[in-house]
Amino acid sequence: MAESEPRDKGQGILEAGTQAPDFTLHATPDQKLSLHELRGRPVILAFYPADWSPVCGDQMALYNEILPEFREHGAELVGISVDGVWCHAAFARHRNLHFPLLSDFEPKGAVSRLFGAYRTEDGTSERALFVLDAEGVIRWSYCSPVGVNPGAEGILNALESLAGSRDGAAKRITAPNAKPESSAEARP
Amino acid sequence: MSNGQLTPPVGDGDHVAGPRDAPVTLVEYGDFECPYCGRAYPIVKNIQRQLGPQLCFVFRHFPLKESHPHAEHAAEAAEAAGAQGKFWEMHDMLFEHQRRLADADLVRYADELGLDAERVARELAMGIWARRVRDDFRSGVRSGVNGTPTFFVNGYRFDGDWTDEGEFLGALRDAAQAAGGQLRA
């Protein structure tokens, strides 16, 4: 599964600046997805407690609607819960989801634990969000109270600041001839 | 994380019922095909009656079109009606006929409201109002909308229980009082 140590309850979820531990999980009954396959673009990992929460504007349905905004940032969205592949398949079909749901099913919750996002008392994942940069480093993370849909504002802010820092780096690289201010001052 | 602050604030482009300078502004992000929004509709109506000129009610679109196949066009139809001066009439019509929101129904409602129904049909077909609806949707995402309906009271997300009309009304009265207090200060 992965080499990293599971995190104890109380340590909290993995924080910004941490390299996200790699993992491989089933995306469909016969397909697996590894985190490293998504390198090269921002990745949103959305851990959530369970499929089939009984509201129509639930978190995954909401993200499904916001997918075009995420994709504008070149980002990939992945949902993760401890539900089995068949459950995910039915849920994704019912909600018309256009992004993969990964099954953290066996050993149960192992990947959630790696990210500090497992609720031992409930046997489910936390409602935890991670935004990874193109190199797989966590740039933002947030753990919502389990009953509260965190929305997407934090994710979009994180993606924007990622884009901002990329643009900044590009400017530094593409503007080698820019004169520092001090030399401008020195000119007559 | 989300501080749940309405972004952008209520402006000239919004559909407003009630005085713009009312002490309480209630914004709903809603979806005409969402059953929960349908449940909220009579509650909001009642609150509008109770608060009268104390309340400015604003509706912004948040169609969950992957879950609700007619929600997008219903929102666009409301905009098309708004362009002919009958946004709120269409808003009410749609919530009162949530189970019949196919394109033909939308055009029929336009006709029943005395609008130029052909123009509404044409604007729906051309997607004239799609951008406007999407702008509302994006502003909702920005503001921390996390489902429908989501309400904002004087710019802040209302996380209480709107299905409890007493609690909802109480929160709005408190907001009115707080706003009044600020004005006096």
Image: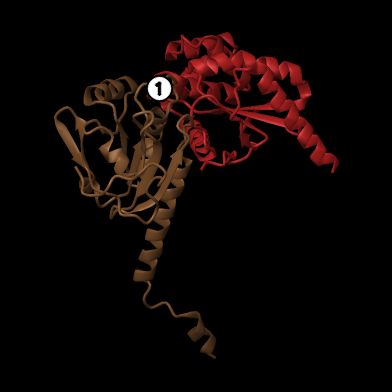
Chain colours: A brown, B red
Q: Residue furthest bottom?
A: A188
Q: Which residue is mark 1?
A: A53
Q: Position of residue B48 (x, y in %)?
A: 70, 19
Q: Is residue A141 above or below residue A109?
A: below
Image-quadrant location for residue A67: top left
Query: Can you say which quadrant of the picture contains the C terminus of chain B?
Result: top right
- On screen, residue B128 versus residue B9, left or right, reads left
Q: Position of residue A100 (x, y in %)?
A: 27, 33
Residue drawn at x 57%, y 21% is B81
Viewer-nearest residue: A9 or A95: A9
Q: Is residue B183 above or below residue B97?
A: below
Image-quadrant location for residue B91: top right
Q: Does residue A77 appear anywhere in the picture?
A: no
Q: Residue furthest right?
A: B184
Q: Is residue A80 above or below residue B78?
A: below
Residue drawn at x 54%, y 25% is B79
Q: Position of residue A118 (x, y in %)?
A: 35, 37
- On screen, residue A173 versus residue A84, left or right, reads right
Residue drawn at x 36%, y 76% is A176
Number of numbered discs visible in the structure rendering: 1
Viewer-nearest residue: B149 or B1: B1
